[in-house]
Every structure is written in C-alpha cells, then in structure tokens.
C-alpha cells in the first residue's frame, strides 16, 4: 500500500469512528430520556443539540474537503 492509500484509509476510519460514536451517544440519550420521564419540550431541546453537533461535524468535513480540493489546505 502506498502512503496515500494509508492516509485515505486512516481518514475514512476516523470518520466512521465518529459516526459510530454519535450513534452510540444518540442511543444513550434516548435511553436516559425514556427512563427519566423528560417532558416533550426537553426532549426536543436535547435532540436539537445532538443534531446540531452532528451537523457541525458534517459541515466541518465538507469544508475541509472543499478546501483541500481547491488547494487552500
């Protein structure tokens, strides 16, 4: 394997790792909300915060890819 292939594999592995972590965090939060009898408004706030964190991570990845393809980074 060349160095470029190894770097690509590491990059994809890291991104997959973060997706799995976000999924596990979501499942843990869902369990806590079910067991804690949290009101609907509180649930919506919790899921909004989780979604915004995930959306920020995705936006960061898109921005990095755009910058690297444009020769900026």
Image (cartoon, helix red, strand yellow):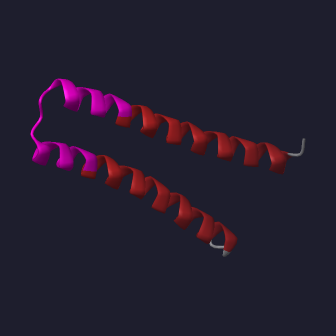
Residue pictured at 54% horizontal, 58% vertical: 61
| Residue situated in front as seen by the camera: 49 or 67 | 49
Confirm whether the magenta stretch covers residue 1: no
Magenta range is: 27-47
Residue 73 visible? no
Residue 30, magenta (yes or no):
yes
The percent position of residue 67, horizontal first and vertical second, equals: 60, 70
Residue depicted at x 53% and y 66% = 63
Q: Main secondary structure of the magenta part?
A: helix
> Where is the C terminus found, in terms of image quarters?
bottom right
> Above or below — where is 30 with respect to 43?
above
Tell me: residue 65, above or below residue 72. Answer: above
Q: Kindly indicate the quadrant of the structure image that contains residue 71.
A: bottom right
Residue closest to the eye, 40 or 22: 40
Asked if residue 34 can be seen in this view, the reply is yes
Residue drawn where x is 59% and y is 41% of the image = 16
- Expressed as whole percent of the image width and height from the top left, the position of residue 69 reads 68, 71
Q: Is residue 28 left or right of residue 66?
A: left
Residue at horizontal 43%, vertical 39%?
22
Residue 65 in percent (x, y) is at 62, 64
Identify the image quadrant of the N terminus. top right
Residue 17 x %, y %:
56, 37
């Amino acid at each position: 394997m060349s160095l470029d292939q190894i770097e690509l594999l590491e990059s994809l592995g890291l991104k997959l790792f973060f997706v799995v972590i976000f999924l596990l965090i979501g499942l843990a939060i869902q369990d806590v909300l079910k067991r804690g009898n949290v009101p609907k408004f509180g649930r919506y706030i919790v899921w909004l915060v989780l979604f915004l964190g995930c959306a920020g991570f995705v936006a960061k990845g898109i921005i990095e890819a755009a910058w690297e393809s444009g020769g900026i980074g």
